[in-house]
Amino acid sequence: MNIVAVANQKGGVGKTTTTVSLGGLLARAGERVLLLDLDPHGSLTSYFGYNPEGSDSGLYTLFQRRAQGQALNPLPLAVETSVEGMSLLCASTAMATLDRQLGGREGMGLVVAESLAMLRAHYSWVLMDCPPMLGVLMVNALAACQHLLVPVQTEFLALKGLERMLRTVSMVQRSRTRALDVTLVPTLFDRRTRASIETLRQLRGDHPDEIWPGVIPVDTQFREASRAGQPLTTMKPSSRGSKAYAQLLDWLLEQTPLGGNIHSLREAIR
Ligand code: ADP
Ligand code: MG
C-alpha cells in the first residue's frame, strides 16, 4: 500500500485538486484507491457530494473511538465516490475540535497510521488531503505517509508559506524511523504572468532536489470538474490539467520507491 499525503499550510494552493486528480488517475488505471479528507473544512468530502456538517464522519469516528481505547476498523466507514475503485473517508467540521479534545493525549499522533495498517489488503493507494494548519490531523498524516506532496502556488506570497511547511516537515523527520520523501509541485502556473515565472524560477533554484520539474497549469476546467463532482482526470483526461497530473504521477512512479507493479501502472496512465 502506497500512502501519499498532500499538504501545505497555505490554503487555495491546489491540495484538494491534487488529491482528487491523482486519485482519479490511479483508479482509472485499475488501482484500488482510498482518499482521506483530513481537513475539517471538508472540501474533499463536499467534492463528492457528502456533507461535512453532519454529526458523523469516517475520520472523526476513528479518532473518537481511539480516544476511548478502541481501534476501529475503518473499512465500513469508507464511502463511494463518483469514480469506480475510489473510496473516501469523510471529514466532518467536528474534527476542528480534535486538537482541543485530544491533542496532548498519548498515541493520538498514530491514529491514521494504525487505521491504515488494517486496510492493507483492500487498497493499493491511500491519498490524504491535509488541513492547512499544523495540529493533530497534520501530524497524523505526516506520520502515516511514505511520500509527501507539497503543492505550491506559483505566486509571490507562496514561498513564505512553503518555508513554514518545510520547517514542519523537518520537525517530523526527526521523529520518523524512515525518511519522508518530499516533492514540491508547482501549481496554478500561468506562463503569461511574471509572478508565475519568477516564483517558479526561485522554487527551482531554492529546492532543486525536491521540486518536480513540470508544472500544473491554470485550467478553468478544474472548476467545472469540481462542480460535476468528478476528478478532471476521469472526466476529461485530454485536458491540459489532466495531462499535467498524469505527468506528475508518471514522474513519481519513476522517481520514488513506491510499491506495486509500477511498470504496468505507468503504461496504464499514459
Ligand atoms: P486547497 O485544497 O489547497 O485549498 P484547492 O485544490 O481547493 O486548494 O484549489 C483552490 C481553488 O482553485 C479551487 O476552486 C480549485 O478548483 C482551483 N484550482 C486548483 N487547481 C487549479 C488549476 N490548476 N487551475 C485552475 N484552478 C485550479
Ligand atoms: Mg482543500
Image (cartoon, rainbow, N blue to C red):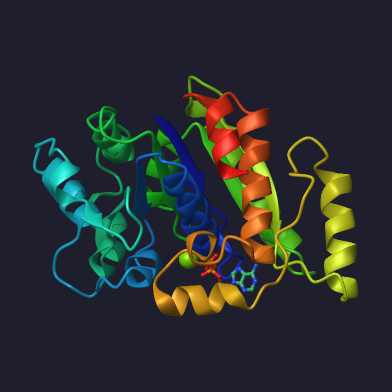
* Observer able to see residue 134: no
Q: Is residue 175 above or below residue 136?
A: above
Q: Residue visible at 45% across and 51% down? A: 23
Report which quarter residue 182 is drawn in. Answer: top right
Give the number of marks: 0
Report which quarter residue 129 is drawn in. Answer: bottom left
Q: Is residue 35 above or below residue 55?
A: above
Q: Quadrant of the N terminus?
A: top left
Residue 37 % position (x, y) = 36, 57
* Observer able to see residue 128: yes
In the rendered image, the residue lying farthest to the top is 177
Q: Residue visible at 15% across and 53% down? A: 61
Residue 147 % position (x, y) = 54, 35
Q: Is residue 31 above or below residue 241?
A: above
* Of 19 and 145, the residue lying toward us: 19
Residue 184 % position (x, y) = 69, 47
Residue 56 % position (x, y) = 14, 64
Horizontally, is 18 left or right of 118 in the view? right
